[in-house]
Image: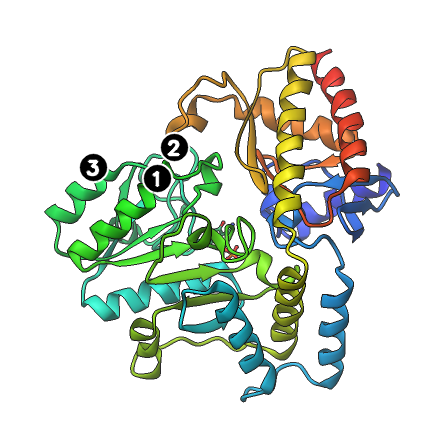
């Protein structure tokens, strides 16, 4: 991989730490040139079945024709007007109709900023300052939300972070209703509970039965705003996201990743009562919010998901893949542990009987998994270094066959 190695060496100087979090997390030094469907090609001409999918956005696969044609057509017409344009209304109507429960939406460019918009609304609505979040979740890289994610320890996630911001939140164990009950009862300064309904960023842990309903009830009792961070789950775990899959309606929800076929678009949506605060003195800004190509991408993506919902196929493909990974591990004496949902699951090395709570990762062998992810890359399977596998609507029989074969050869290699 001569070209990749040269480019990687230069990137280390040019963009320290890597512009992409993947480089930071010790990804293999592969440089990519193009993608199509569920496949990627590197600059040295090798192909990969992709289960990273850009960390989730390429839910329709790479280069989805209808989305990219729509973006190109609008880009030719003009891209950022700095004023109203018809596509934003159209994207808004379609978005709200697809989500179902939400009454208003505002578009943004990244999940990080739409999370901030939701938190600001909650503070404005309640007149309170703090929020509850769960250990191991991720709500973007800004100072007030960034905490260590892997080991569930409360503390700054970065050097240089405003120290006092870490104290803006109460950090509780995921799936722990009693802890939430106690915290909301003990403090009257809590504006919001923000939760990844499926804790994707630390082991892809689904909510235990009734957890989200209990959270909803507790928020109602204490007058606290419930925010679902659906940046990963939105349009992925069901057309209407986790709110639909688990039948719980938040007050606000934040979307990103899968909603625009790979293009950078995010959204905050929710009740009219809260969202209409933006029509008053609550500020939400952003030069690129609701840009023309962004709205075109949303319209085309939601159009595809509504006309040909991939969810049944994803359930099937993902379930088979999860079983295959365990089976491959067993065949080669690798203790591969798989958990999560078919469309986003987590693979690690460790005893499958180990706890399924947020502390799970701390006792697992992350380094071994990272090494394994490099072996997978050597054999033509592209995954994240920390264990999350995403499945796209473009994965089918051909990809399953290639994945199975490549998994077996990678596992043989890893076991040797
Ligand atoms: N929330 C969650 C649950 C996420 O997984 C992410 C991104 N991994 C974000 C927020 C931040 O989104 P973005 O990277 O688009 O800023």
Residue 25 appears in the picture as rendered: yes
Label 3 sits on residue: 178
Dot 1: element: loop
Q: Residue at x 49, y 16 (%)?
A: 351
Position of residue 110 measured from the top left corner of the image (x, y, whole percent) = 52, 62
Image quadrant where residue 104 sits: bottom left
Q: Residue at x 61, y 41 (%)?
A: 315
Label 2 sits on residue: 358
Q: How far apart are the alpha carbons under marks 1 and 2?
A: 7 Å
Do the CB atoms of the residues marked 1 and 2 lie less than 8 Å apart? Answer: yes
Question: Dot 3: few (<14), some (14–19), or many (≥20) neighbours within 10 Å?
Answer: few
Q: Residue at x 30, y 77 (%)?
A: 277
Circle nearer the viewer, 1 or 3: 3
**Most foreground residue, 157 or 113:** 113
Position of residue 172 measured from the top left corner of the image (x, y, whole percent) = 27, 40
Q: Is residue 317 above or below residue 310?
A: above
Q: Which mark is residue 135?
A: 1
Residue 141 appears in the picture as rendered: no
Q: How far apart are the alpha carbons under marks 3 and 2?
A: 15 Å
Question: Dot 2: few (<14), some (14–19), or many (≥20) neighbours within 10 Å?
Answer: many
């Amino acid at each position: 991989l001569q070209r990749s190695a040269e480019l990687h060496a230069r990137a280390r100087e040019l963009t320290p730490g890597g512009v992409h979090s993947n480089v930071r997390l010790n990804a293999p030094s592969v440089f990519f040139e193009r993608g199509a469907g569920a496949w990627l090609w590197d600059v040295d001409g090798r192909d990969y079945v992709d289960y990273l999918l850009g960390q989730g956005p390429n839910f329709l696969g790479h280069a989805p024709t209808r989305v990219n044609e729509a973006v190109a057509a609008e880009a030719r017409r003009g891209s950022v007007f700095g004023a109203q344009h018809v596509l934003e209304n159209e994207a808004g109507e379609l978005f709200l109709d697809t989500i179902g429960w939400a009454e208003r939406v505002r578009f943004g460019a990244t999940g990080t900023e739409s999370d901030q918009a939701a938190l600001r609304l909650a503070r404005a609505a309640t007149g309170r300052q703090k929020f509850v979040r769960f250990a191991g979740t991720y709500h973007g890289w800004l100072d007030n939300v960034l905490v260590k994610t892997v080991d569930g320890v409360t503390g700054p996630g970065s050097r240089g972070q405003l120290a006092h911001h870490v104290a803006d939140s109460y950090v509780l164990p995921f799936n722990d209703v009693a802890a939430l009950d106690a915290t909301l009862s003990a403090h009257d300064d809590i504006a919001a509970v923000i939760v990844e309904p499926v804790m994707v960023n630390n082991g892809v842990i689904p909510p235990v039965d009734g957890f989200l309903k209990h959270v909803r009830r507790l928020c109602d009792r204490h007058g606290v705003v419930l925010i679902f961070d659906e940046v990963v789950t939105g349009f992925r775990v069901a057309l209407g996201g986790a709110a639909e899959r688990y039948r719980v309606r938040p007050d606000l929800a934040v979307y990103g990743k899968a909603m625009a076929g790979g293009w950078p678009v995010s959204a905050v949506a929710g009740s009219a009562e809260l969202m209409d605060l933006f029509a008053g003195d609550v500020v939400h800004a952003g030069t690129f919010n609701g840009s023309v190509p962004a709205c075109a991408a949303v319209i085309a993506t939601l159009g595809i998901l509504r006309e040909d919902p991939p969810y049944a196929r994803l359930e099937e493909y993902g379930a088979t893949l999860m079983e295959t990974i365990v089976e491959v591990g067993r065949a080669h004496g690798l203790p591969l542990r798989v958990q999560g949902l078919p469309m986003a699951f987590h693979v690690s090395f460790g005893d499958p009987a180990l706890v399924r709570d947020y502390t799970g990762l701390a006792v697992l062998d992350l380094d071994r998994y990272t090494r394994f992810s490099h072996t997978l890359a050597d054999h033509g399977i592209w995954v994240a270094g920390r264990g999350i596998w995403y499945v796209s609507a473009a994965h089918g029989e051909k990809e399953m066959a290639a994945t199975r074969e490549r998994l077996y050869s990678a596992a043989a290699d890893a076991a040797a």
